[in-house]
Structure formats: C-alpha cells, structure tokens
Image (cartoon, grey):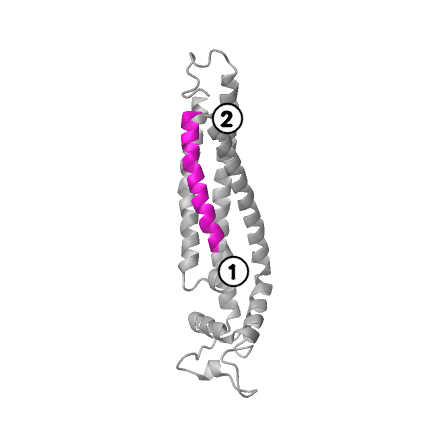
Amino acid sequence: MQATKVLTILLNVLTWAVSCVVLGVGIWMMVNPYGVVNEFITQAIPIVFICLGGLTGFAAIYGCFAAQWESPAQLRVFLGTFAFLIMVLVIFLVTGFFYEYSASVTVPAIWNDQYANDPGFLANVERKFRCCGLTTVDDKSVPKPTFPDENLCLTDKVEFGFERPCYPVLTHQFDQELMLTMGSAIVVTGLMILTFVSALVLYSRVVAAQTNPFYETQGLLSTPQ
C-alpha cells in the first residue's frame, strides 16, 4: 500500500502542475488582445478553463493530503470531486471537437450577425487582424459602402487599407487557440484519470486494511478512522 500511496501523491503533484498550465492558458485566452475565441467566438471557453484549472489544482493538493493521511473519508471526497471534474473535462473536449469542425460555419454566422447589428465590432476586428471583409475583401466589409462599388475598408488607408480577407485569418487563429486548449485539456484529463484510478486502488486497500483487526499494529494506516 505504501507504493500506491506514493504513486497517488506523485500523480497528484503532476496533475497540480498541469492544472497550473491550464489556468495559465485560460488567463492568456482572456487577456490576449488577438484572441479569436475570447473576442470573436465566446468568452465561455477561457472562463471554463480558468475554473477547471483552479478547481483541479485545489483538488490535486487535497488529494496529496488525503493519500498521505490514508483517510477513507477524505479519499472519498477526493474521488467524488475528481470524478466530477473528469466528467466536465470530457464534456469540454467533446464540445471542443464540435467547435473545431463548426468553425467554418460559426465564423461566417457571427460575421453576418455583427454586420447587420454591430458593424463597429467588425471594424475593430478588421483593424486588429489587419484584414477586410469576410471571404473576400468585398464580402461584407466595414465601414459599410455608401455606393455599390465602394470599398472603404480598402480605400481608407488611414484606418484600414488592408488587402486580405478576414476569414482565413480568423479561422487560422481560432484553430491555433483551440489546439492549445484541447491539447492541455487532453493531458490534464489523462493525468486525472490515472490519479483517480491510483486513488481508488489506495482507497480500496485502506478500507480493506480497516477490516483487519491487526491493522494498527501492522502500521498499515497512519491515521485510523
């Protein structure tokens, strides 16, 4: 059981370290001025990442103490918390794969909606990413043309004057951010599953040891319950 306890503690330490990376990625996505996910798609992803990173790190630290003290009650709390967090991460990964395959639909849909309701938002996007229009420089570019053949985004060299469309720029940046978030989520999920299994084995051995009337004299538990 000593080896299982040490393994559980080490896995919790590794999970804590990776959770700090997840937390950092979430903060970076939130404050990155060129972040497509946060600025253009949804603010939910960085918020979820920050929450998951913080909660996973706290749970991993708690798991270290639970394993060290070999407390069945604390191990049960740890296992329940980790099971919940793993479930949330799996849902996040499934949602992430959905977003990855729907980027070609999501970006145009948001662009069309903003073009009709908030063109000023698209003007800021064009300035930030140095692009004009959506699929082409003439496709719903902002500022909106006064005349049919006018393209102020191309001709206004002071504020705009960019000669590439925004769609490939936005989708490329979106794919990069999604790859970073999905990669870190997959790593932390894998570590959490390994930690959960190790803690579950430790819990079963601790409970089994408590049924042994000689477990105190054998030194199997440091903190009998």
**Residue 85, x across and y down, in percent:** 52, 42
Residue at 47% in and 80% down: 153
Residue at 50% in and 65% down: 40
Q: Nearer the viewer, residue 223 or 200?
A: 223
Q: Is residue 3 left or right of residue 211?
A: left
**Residue 92, x across and y down, in percent:** 55, 49
Residue at 40% in and 42% down: 17
Q: Main secondary structure of the magenta part?
A: helix
Question: Which residue lies under the disc numbered 1?
Answer: 42
**Residue 62, x across and y down, in percent:** 42, 35
Specify whether residue 2 is painted magenta: no
Q: What's drawn in magenta, residue-wise?
A: 46-70
Does residue 76 lie above or below 25 as drawn?
above
Q: Amino acid at mark 2?
A: Tyr
Q: Amino acid at mark 1?
A: Thr
User: Quick one: SS at disc 1?
Assistant: loop
Q: Which numbered disc, 1 or 2, marks the residue that appears first in the sequence?
A: 1
Q: Nearer the viewer, residue 79 or 225?
A: 225
Question: Which residue lies under the disc numbered 2?
Answer: 203
**Residue 197, x across and y down, in percent:** 52, 32
Q: Is residue 64 visible?
A: yes
